[in-house]
Amino acid sequence: MKLTKAQYDEIAQFLGHVQPTRQSLRKLKERFPSQSQSTLLSIFSQEYQKQIKRTHAKHHTAEAVETYYQRYLNGVMKNAAAPVLLELANEVDFAPSLMARIVLERFLQEKEQAIPSKTLINSMLRDPSQIPDGVLANQVYQCTVNDCCYGPLVDCIKHAIGHEHEVLLREMLLEKNLSFIAEDQLRAKGYDKTPDFILEVPVAVEGHIIHWIESKASFGDESSHQAYLQDQFWSYWNRFGPGLVIYWYGFIEELDCHRERGILLKDCFPTDIVTLRHSMAQR
Amino acid sequence: MAAVLELLLREEVAVAAVVRWLLHGPGHRPAEENHIHEKLVSLSLLQKDFVPFLLNFLREQTSQILTNGPSTPAKTPNSKAHGSQRTGSERRAGHATSSRVQLFSQRTSVTTCTTDTSFSPAVASSSSSSFSGSSLSSPCGDFPSMVSSSSPSFGYSPLLNHGEKRSSQKASLGSFLTAMPEALPARRGRRKGSGSVSASGRPVARDLGHCLTEEEDGKSDSASWSGGRRKWSEVPPVSARSPPSQLNLNNLEEFPPMGAASGWTNKSKPSRRINPTPVSAERPLSKPKMCFTSTPVSQSPAARFSSGTSLEAFTAVQEGNLTSMISNSLQEEREMLKKERCKLQHQASSPAGISLDPGTPTKPSYTRSASLPPESHLVTCADLTKVSCKKQLECLAQLYSSCIAENLVPNIFLELFFVLQLLTSKGTSTAEDGDSDLEINERTKDASGKQHFRSVHNCVYFAVQVLDYQYEIISRLEKGLLKLLAENERIASFSPSLHRRLRQAYESSTAKVSLLLPCSVQSVSFQPETDNRSNFPSDRAFHIFKKQRDIFYELLREWEDNHEKTGWDFERVLGNKIRAMMAHLSATCNHSHFARLFQKQLIQMCKGPVGGGASSGDTPDQDVLNMLGSDNLSRLKRLQERFIVPQSIRGPCPPPSFPGCQQFFRDFILSAGSYQFNQHLMDSLCLKILELNGLTLVEHEHSDGEADMDEQDEKKRFTVVLLSLRLLAKFLGFLVFLPYRTVEQPTRDLQDSAVALRNQTLPVLDVLKLLRQSIQDHRSILTIPWIVEYLSLVDHIAPFLDYYRKIFCLLLQVYRLMVLSEDKEMSFLNKLLILAVLGWLFQVPSVPEELFFTTDVRQEGLMMDTVTSAQALDSVPLVDQQLLYTCCPYLGELRKLLASFVAGSGAKNGGFIRKITPTAAESLAPKASVTQRKLQVELEQAFFHNQPPSLRRTVEFVAERVGSNCVKHIKATLVAELVQRAEVMLQDKVKEEDANHDKLLEEVCAHLYEEGAQALIKGREFCKKKGPEAVRVLLPEETSAAVLSSAEDIAVDLATEKACGWLSANIAALIKREVKATFNRMLKVPGLALPSEDALELRRDCPAGCQHCAPFPSQIINEIKDVLCIAVGPRDEGEVIDYIWLECLLGRLSETLRCRKFMCPTSEQQLAKCTVELASLLVSDRVPLRLRVESPEKTSERLRVKNNPTCALLKLLLSVWKEDFGTPVPVQLIFSKKNIGYLAEVKQREWDLFLFMLHGLVEHELMRSSEIESCLRSLEELPWPSDFLKELEVLSRVFTSEHRVAEPRTNPCELTRQSLGTVAAQS
């Protein structure tokens, strides 16, 4: 679904300081009933991430960490069953999963008398059962489950969505009889940058030649698109020529401005495909 | 010098004799042997100087008439504007600057990295200066312009000394004169002023003396000749040239009539602010000059000023000259200036004053008062009847043409340009009655000093004569030029026969040239063989190069977007980024990789004609293209060309430049300033040049005449290779000479030491060897054009190095020998290309001026094998007009000159102004298929982009061979058959009537042509059959099916296109030829494959008949996450989970897990984990289920109802775990401290559910009972509340005992209730 910049801005504005909980999501859906749920979620997630990036540092100062930890301790002392961490995160406008991480890190540091490794933390966040403290384990789990923008569960969902759309795209390519080389094959050949699919025989989409297709199971907003252009799309162009990006959850219309240059945006699998001499008789 | 001309003009010596004299160097053989005219024998030492003298003579002579060149004339004309008002010395200086400026609008000042490659501002300024005469507004007006334009100039004065030249300034053609074999001292001479010994003067004089004594008792000399001779011999050897005062006074060209005062005003641009003040005074100090053409001093001044317009002017001139003789200061010049200004103001007050013409009659009254009719501003109608001194003009034309034909002039196109300027010269109508002057002229004794070109009529007459002589060359030029010439009414009226021939040439010409081929920017594709990790020493190097590649394209894109914007500066914007990039490359020694990328991208973007005019502005808008389709595309292109290709005339010898995208690459190199990079790039360029230069481009013997298909292919290939070579060579030259580049010509001393130093170094690429080799192998048509590009970028010193001197010498030799004619050795256009590029090279600013005329062309090294092998490229007609003009876009100046004449000639020639007919809407609708076709072509190009280059080569090779074979096949079968039938038919008919054979032949052939159409069908079949076979055999076995089939298709199509294209164009001719041949003999002797199914990708096994319409894993995870959320809390008031919904979710989970299509390991693992969590929460009654059947009855009843559904859910989960998961489910997580903790938190513990779960696990073989037991045991060791611990222990015991004895047959639910009872009882 393509959104105009104005439409997008309206949504983004609404998202201002909304907490990343299912309750917020519900409100968002009520507010913008015409937009698809996944699009809204994707925009929400991206906007929230932007906000977190802005404020990330202030939650990581030594003082902040200490404050949060003490508040957590006090909280669970009073009532271990209460959603202490979650509420704390919401109160200070921080992602619950990230709050859980801060507190867990602090907790382990105190327990082990050493800064715990990232791997350990990640593993504990993924499986809170490994957390030695039962109460903290519960609190952390509550945070990760309730967070709809961060956390291992969300990461996994995003990954799954990405994968599924790649599969979908692959299916569509097969259905259209377009032969391609997939990313893993390309990697095996030693390509340094690899789009999802390189068409072995290029096609023309809406009159533009494309050599590769990248599937993005997210909404294409300005900042993410810029980042993708920089890290991926131009790099693909530099190596393989023009290509197509499918933002399955839509994008801001105005971003589709590099068509002439060789980067085409779509929010679905294109229908107007011309293949190389499908019928020789015409020539 | 003048003597020779004198002899000629007086018809004492024939033109042929002079030419012979010119062609045979001195001292080769006795004169008689070469049949050199005796009168010329004595002058043999002057041979070398004669051609430049002649050229300058012509320019001097015509200088006045060419006041109005086309709007921005490239060379000669403008300067005449001042010239006509000034004394010879000044004029010469003026020429020296302005004309040279026009020729080479500006020296490439490469050191300052300007983004302006075309130097148009310089062009503009220089041309405007010639209009405005700004150089005249100050007494030393020449200086500023000379300094500002460090470019060389093309002089006019035959004996121009370097007096006023700055070292930075390039000497002129005229200065070649002074530059004798040991000519370099000429530069010193300049400082010494007029009386100084001209370096060249000495030997001339000395040798002259010899000659003269020998000839002392010769026969009668003509008066003028003897006069001239005497004068020469009288002159002491030290100052061979007579002092200026003696000479200039007598010379009409040196001393043009003052009435020409306003020659510049004839310009079509009326609004010039600055009115130049002509100064007529000698400046002996600053500008010594001597002129062999000058008439003796003794002549009456009246004669000299016969054509002067005003008495004032006359006296002024006279005074000026006299004073200059006495005083050497500039003071009098200033005085002169004042006077002239004053006069001008006078004149300006009357309208007539500004429209005076060089040829204005003497009568002052006329010039003063006549108000001219408006037509006078129009072009003079050249009239054949008004031509004077025809004989002499014819003579000169013949001589001049011979010089051109014998390659004695440094640049034939420069001369042609000059001739066209004469043809298009615009005198005003007032010039028409110049008879009185002519009469006076006739009286002039010195024929060579006479003004032969004083009227437009004479100029046009001369020009038409020369064009007639040069018809051969002209007729080979592009069609547009021919059209303009054919339409030129001056030619039509002066020489109907030439007009007719031009018309014919135009009509039969196929030489349409387009200089604008849109090319789109493409990237260099990533090729694993050269680009993957194994090509790099370390991961880091690989990774860094990955980044550098992206940065490079980023820079390129930025440049593309912005470089045309005003104020955008390459160095300022990109400089630091580029240097940062270089630093990274240095750190990882990746230069070679980058150099390769750079070089490939360079070729990709710039191999097009206009340097790859792919700057965004040049590429036509895609939508427009789509709309128009490819038919109209060419029209659009032409239209666009008119708008885009600069119409301004830059002259036929622009300095080397980096047009279009080349600019980016040049500026990149400059900004990078990286020694390593440059070195690697040079290596890369050299390698590629050697590779391309060595390519075998012609593989078979050529048939005579008729262009075969293979020849067309070869031509195409040759073009591509040649253009690439030229591009690469230009950049190589740029890099090689970059370190030595100076803005100004270095001083002599510096030069000597630099030469001494640099003579010790070896060249990066042995160009000399390659050149020699190419000449030997008859491949110079490929090699010389790129060597010229390479050499065009030489610095000022390089040409003086021994090595490069040899190269230039050799090139000069080639040039001289390459007399234009069609012969076996080399085709006409091949020669023309070589001549054009060499001619251009000789005019390049940094190529020393004395080179052309002074280099002794020894017959060294020009050893050509007479055996012409198949390799002998030179003999193959490879060059066509398109290639010629692509390589030498400046040839287009000829056409522009004519076009601007047409445009400027106004209503009188109204018919000539062609309107641009819109190509509009005629057929936009049915063009869909055209668009499609265009898209197909693009797709085809795109297809090859990411494939290894060998694929393309293979396909093209196959296409070429199959196409060619196809034609051969058709010839052998169909045509042969037709010919047989024709034979039969002819035999019958010949017997019948002995009538007209030709007609008979026509008739029979006409019959066969229809059947000839069969050829196309058969050809198509042939290609379709053979193409795929060949492709399949030649491509690697591993090529994927899709690629293979596309390659086959393309090969088939290309082959078909080639074969059918050729057949449809030539089948008739072929049949005719064959039939004719047979007939003659008779008379003499009475008697794709379909795209194959792509191998379906192997899938993990979905159940048979799976429609893959299960919910996505992500969806299920998300939904389970929501359940977990509610279960874990916090919940909203009254938030529950619908039981049915949850049950359904688990059902969908099962479906999702069964369809493997969209599943990935992470999703599956997450699902496993989540469901275990869900089970734990269910077991501990944390999930607020809402049941549909709400029965608020007894507690026991509620309990039962409540238990059942949870059990059902758990059962579902158990079966999903067992049946549907592909990965192991971490069921042991149920026993984690956290999950058991949920149970511990519950007030009323539901141990029955837990026990049910445990049994289920065992039953479904998800865990063994022993495992569970050990889990339970380890749980007991954790610090639980005491009551919970107690219950746990009981549970553990119950489980253990039950599983030791329990029959698996027992209904688990009942069992649960049993055990529940036990637990409850025991706690």
Image (cartoon, coloured by chain):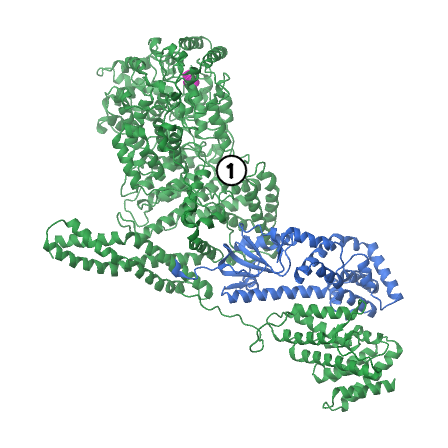
Label 1 sits on residue: B738
Residue A150 in view (yes/no): no
Give percent across and percent down for residue B639.
43, 41
Q: Amino acid at mark 1?
A: Leu
Residue A254 in view (yes/no): yes
- Classify the position of the C terminus of chain A by image quarter: bottom left
Q: Which type of secondary structure does the marked residue at label 1 adopt?
A: helix
**Counting other residues with Cα less than 10 Å from the Cα at mark 1, is it few (<14), some (14-19), or many (20 or more)?**
some
Q: Quadrant of residue A156?
A: bottom right
A68 or B832, which lies in front?
Answer: A68
Give percent across and percent down for residue A11.
69, 55
B275 or B919, which lies in front?
Answer: B919
Per the rendering, the colour in which chain B appears is: green
Residue B576 located left or right of residue B713: right
Per the rendering, the colour in which chain A appears is: blue
B396 or A237, which lies in front?
Answer: A237
**Is residue A202 depicted above or below B921 in this figure?**
below
Residue A127 located left or right of residue B634: right
* Residue B174 lies in the magenta-colored region: no
Residue A258 located left or right of residue B153: right
Give percent across and percent down for residue B63.
38, 22
Q: Quadrant of residue B163?
A: top left
Q: Which residues are magenta?
A: B84-90
B590 or B261, which lies in front?
Answer: B261
- Classify the position of the N terminus of chain A by image quarter: bottom right
